[in-house]
Each structure stands twice: as structure tokens, then as C-alpha cells.
Image (cartoon, rainbow, N blue to C red):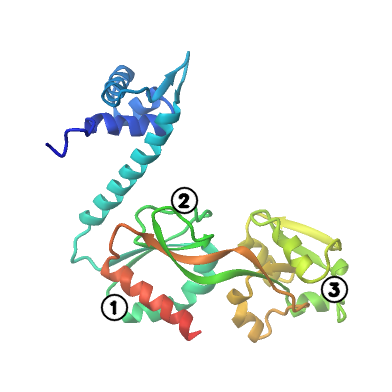
Amino acid sequence: MSAHRNLPPLPALRIFEAASRRQSFLLAARELNLTPGAVSKQIRQLEEHLGLPLFERLHREVRLTAAGAIYARAIGQLFEDLRAATAEVMVSPAADKLVVWCAPWFLKAWLLPRLERFRALRPGLQMDLRTGESSEAIDPKADIAIRLGLGTWARMRSEFLIPQEIAAVCTPAYLRREGLSQPFAFGDFVVLDSANTPHHLELWKQAAGMAGVEPRERIVFQSNETAFAAALTDHGLALVNPYFVEAELANGRLVCPWPARTRTDRSYWLTWRDRFNLPPAASAFRRWILAEFRRE
């Protein structure tokens, strides 16, 4: 019996993947440079091959059936694996190149200050550092990634790096300017908060025993990074991962008015696709970063 006997036509699968992802025959046709009629015909042939409908045809739209949704998830993952495998084999084995995706706060506060140590181990390595706001949607071309989350990304291997902790910091200059001294009162402080993590303030207040106490003022920034930048320029109290500001705390540029720290449910993880071997440069990066954390 042929191993291909039960497989549906591959062109139809490509069209189904686009149509299910777009939820539209018209948009799939535009993406694939086909006519809507050609898309509809291929989907119909696929349904006949499977013996069940994949889409409900409504007046001006199409909607996946229950079976279609199950099939779409599986086919979508197969095409994602195919794209990743294609990108992997198209890279010349002789090319000493590494594409790293990194969560922005980790990139700025931890990786960049230490990056020369890794580069010294791999002279001539061409590095491509990429980042983005969400660890849920990283660049698919990344060989390896440092992500913030629960460590449960589908079809990815994950190695724990550090937890996401929260501490409150400010500059000594801010305390002097506002005339603040121990014992500190939270109600006297301006809090520099982030719209990305609005729940962190309440988490920290609970850990500090100040649930229900409000600051004098709360300024909301678009990201944690901009809130921290404001704290460094003496504008108030920011919530940060203390691991990322160890140097500033050690040299006195920042202080913690209260010793309270707490953890969120998220951590930083080193991740890569579980179906593919790490390229040599990515494997060297993994060994280096794990050794750095053991050393620290």
C-alpha cells in the first residue's frame, strides 16, 4: 500500500491553511494569487477527499466547522514546522550566524551588558538580535529566544533562567528633592507605573503590607522600560525586577525604600523549537548563558 494513499492533495492543503487562517476565501485567494473560485474549488475537493465539510458557507462569509477547526490547527502547525525547517536548511552550514530573539527588558538590562563576553568566545560570529513587545509572538527566524511567560509554549523546549520579581526603587536624589526620609510613607510617593503590567503595583503593595494604601500620585507609562527611565531621572518610584538593577543598587544610583520583594507567575525562559537541533552557534549561546547564571 502506498504511504501517500490517504494523503489529501498538497495544493489543497496549502489553500486550506490560508483560508482557515484568514477566515475568508477572498483573502486567501489574494494571498496566494488565485481567484476566489479556484480557492473554493480546491476546498470543495479537499472536503470530498475527507468526506466531511470543513467550512460553513454563509451569505457573505465562511466559518470553520468543528472538524474544520481541529484540522486547521493541525495543518497550521505542519506548515509552521515546514517554514521553520525550510529556513533552517536554506542557511549555509558554513555561515557562522546566530539569530536571537529576546524580551526587551532582559535584552537591555541583562544581555547587552554581558554580550561581549559571549562574542569573545565566538570571534567572527554574525549576531542578529531581535525583540518585540510580546513573548507570545516572536520572530520565527530566531534560532533561540529568551522569553517572558509560563514556559509552556507549544512545540518549544524551555529552560528556566530567572523568575520575574518586583521591587520598588527610586533615586536618592528623588528622596532628597521631596524631603522623604525613614520611616517612609507610601502615600508621600509618586509611583511610575506601566500600562503593560497594571497588576504589579497591587502585588507589590500586598507583599509590602500596604494593600489599600494609595500613592500621592500615579503616572502611567506605556512600558516598564519608560517607567524605569523616569525613575532614573528622579521622577518617582518604579517597580522593577531587582535582578536587573543589581549594579545600580550596589553603586547607590538607586535605593529600595522598602525591602519588600514579590514574584509574579511569570519567569524568563530560554526556548527553541523542540523538533529541530540547535545550530552550532545557538548551542554555544545556550551553554554560555546557562554558565553565566550558574556563575552569578
Q: Residue furthest left?
A: 1
User: From this viewpoint, is residue 235 visible?
Assistant: no
Residue type at numbered disc 1? Pro
Estimate the x, y position of residue 215 in percent, counting from the top left: 84, 63
Q: Quadrant of residue 176?
A: bottom right
Q: Nearer the viewer, residue 160 or 189?
A: 160
View extreme (front): residue: 1
Relative horizontal placement of residue 91, taking residue 182 as reference (left or right)? left
Q: Earlier in the sequence, mark 2 or mark 3?
A: 2
- Disc 1 element: loop
Q: Nearer the viewer, mark 2 or mark 3?
A: 2
Residue 219's x, y, as percent?
76, 58
Q: Element at badge 3?
A: helix
Residue denoted by label 3? 178
Pointer 2 residue: 137
Residue 181 shown left or right of residue 276 in the figure: right
Tell me which amino acid carries mark 3.
Answer: Glu
Q: CA distance from mark 2 to mark 3?
A: 42 Å
Disc 1 marks which residue?
123
Residue at 29% x, 72% y: name it: 125
Nearer the observer, 166 or 91: 166
Residue density around tag 3, few if under 14, some if 14–19, many if 20 or more, within 10 Å = few
Tell which tag, 1 or 2, sits nearer the viewer. Answer: 2
Mark pair 1, 3: CA separation: 49 Å
**Whether residue 50 is situated above or below residue 230 in the rendered picture:** above
As helix, strand or loop, the secondary structure at mark 2 comes to: loop
Mark 1, Cα crowd under 10 Å, few <14 / some 14-19 / many 20+, is few
Q: Position of residue 23 (x, y in %)?
A: 44, 28
Nearer-the-camera pick, 142 or 15? 15
What amino acid type should be assigned to the residue bearing mark 2? Ala
Report if the CB atoms under discs 2 and 3 are less than 8 Å apart: no
Residue at 87% x, 72% y: name it: 185
